Image (cartoon, helix red, strand yellow):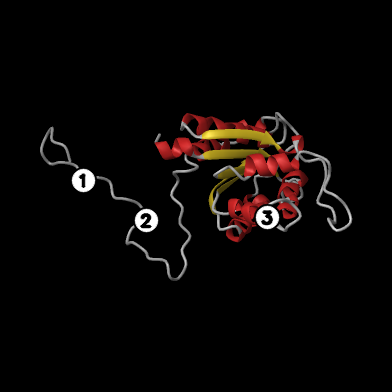
């Protein structure tokens, strides 16, 4: 653990209505990993804050719920966000989608200080954890692409993705791919995991990973 790790704030958002479901299990595993690494992490359920969709703001007010609290007081101050969602019809849950949709009212000028909001929306680390009934690898690719494009749009880094399968509550723990362990690792490494996304002009080194230190040929000697 280092001081930078301790100063980073991770928001884990669960887009499932089940408090003991598989998406929640992924979120709780990530929370354990983050806390073990010394990261300040918070896990919230989206439907505790959102009770309506984005309306036509020219003719109606935003729903009277706690979305502004979630967005302004939890999301904007966070340095990273991990979204945990079930796969519903090969997309994210309505709760999760509404979280992104409703942000429009804050950065498009309907809310206070849109320039400050836009500045705080950018440059975050983002992660995704999904739970589906199917083990089919493509089941969640639509969600992956959506988060990837959100990261691109907001100049953020999409640092990790976990996919687990389960139908009954908690069944994801039996997935032989061990998604709960992967989610815990993602939580622990959220702000230290190497991220690269090259462009044609990106300066490149000859190696991706640092070489292991050479072993000493002298018995008992240090490298």
Relative to the observer, which residue lies in front, 21 or 158?
158
Q: Residue at x 21, y 45 (%)?
A: 214
Residue depicted at x 47% and y 37%: 7
Q: Label 2's element?
A: loop
Q: Nearer the viewer, mark 1 or mark 3?
A: 3
Calculate the distance from the C-alpha at mark 1 to the C-alpha at mark 3. Answer: 52 Å
Figure disc tally: 3
Q: Earlier in the sequence, mark 2 or mark 3?
A: 3
Sequence-first disc among 1 and 2: 2
On residue 128, the disc is none
124 shown above or below 3: below
Q: Measure the alpha-carbon separation of dots 2 and 3.
A: 38 Å
Position of residue 200 measured from the top left corner of the image (x, y, whole percent): 45, 71
The local crowd at label 3, few if under 14, some if 14 to 19, many if 20 or more residues have their Cα within 10 Å, is some
**Other residues around mark 1 within 10 Å, as few (<14) / some (14–19) / many (≥20):** few
What number is the disc on residue 214? 1
Residue at the left extreme, as displayed: 218
Horizontal and vertical percent for residue 114?
Answer: 68, 55
Q: Secondary structure at mark 1?
A: loop
Return the residue at label 3. Answer: 114
State the residue at coordinates (77%, 41%).
50
Determine which of the numbered discs, if any, sits on residue 208 in the image: 2
> Of label 1 and label 3, which has the lower sequence position?
3
Whether residue 172 can be seen here: no
Left or right: residue 160 versus residue 172 is left
Among all residues in the image, which is located at the extreme bottom?
200
Q: Secondary structure at mark 3?
A: helix
């Amino acid at each position: 653990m280092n001081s930078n790790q301790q100063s980073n704030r991770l928001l884990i958002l669960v887009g499932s209505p089940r408090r003991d479901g598989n998406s929640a299990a992924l979120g709780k595993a990530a929370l354990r990993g983050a806390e073990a690494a010394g990261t300040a992490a918070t896990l919230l359920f989206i439907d505790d804050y959102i009770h309506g969709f984005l309306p036509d703001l020219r003719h109606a007010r935003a729903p009277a719920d706690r979305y502004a609290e979630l967005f302004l007081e939890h999301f904007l101050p966070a340095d990273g966000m991990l979204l945990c969602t079930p796969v519903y019809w090969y997309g994210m849950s309505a709760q999760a989608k509404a979280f992104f949709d409703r942000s429009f009212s804050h950065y498009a000028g309907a809310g206070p200080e849109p320039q400050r909001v836009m500045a705080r929306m950018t440059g975050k680390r983002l992660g995704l954890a999904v739970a589906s009934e199917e083990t089919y690898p493509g089941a969640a690719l639509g969600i992956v692409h959506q988060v990837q494009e959100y990261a691109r749009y907001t100049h953020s880094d999409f640092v990790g993705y976990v996919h687990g399968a389960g139908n009954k509550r908690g069944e994801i723990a039996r997935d032989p791919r061990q998604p709960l362990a992967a989610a815990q690792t993602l939580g622990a490494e959220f702000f230290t995991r190497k991220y690269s996304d090259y462009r044609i002009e990106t300066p490149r080194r000859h190696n991706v990973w640092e070489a292991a230190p050479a072993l000493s040929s002298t018995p008992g000697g240090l490298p």
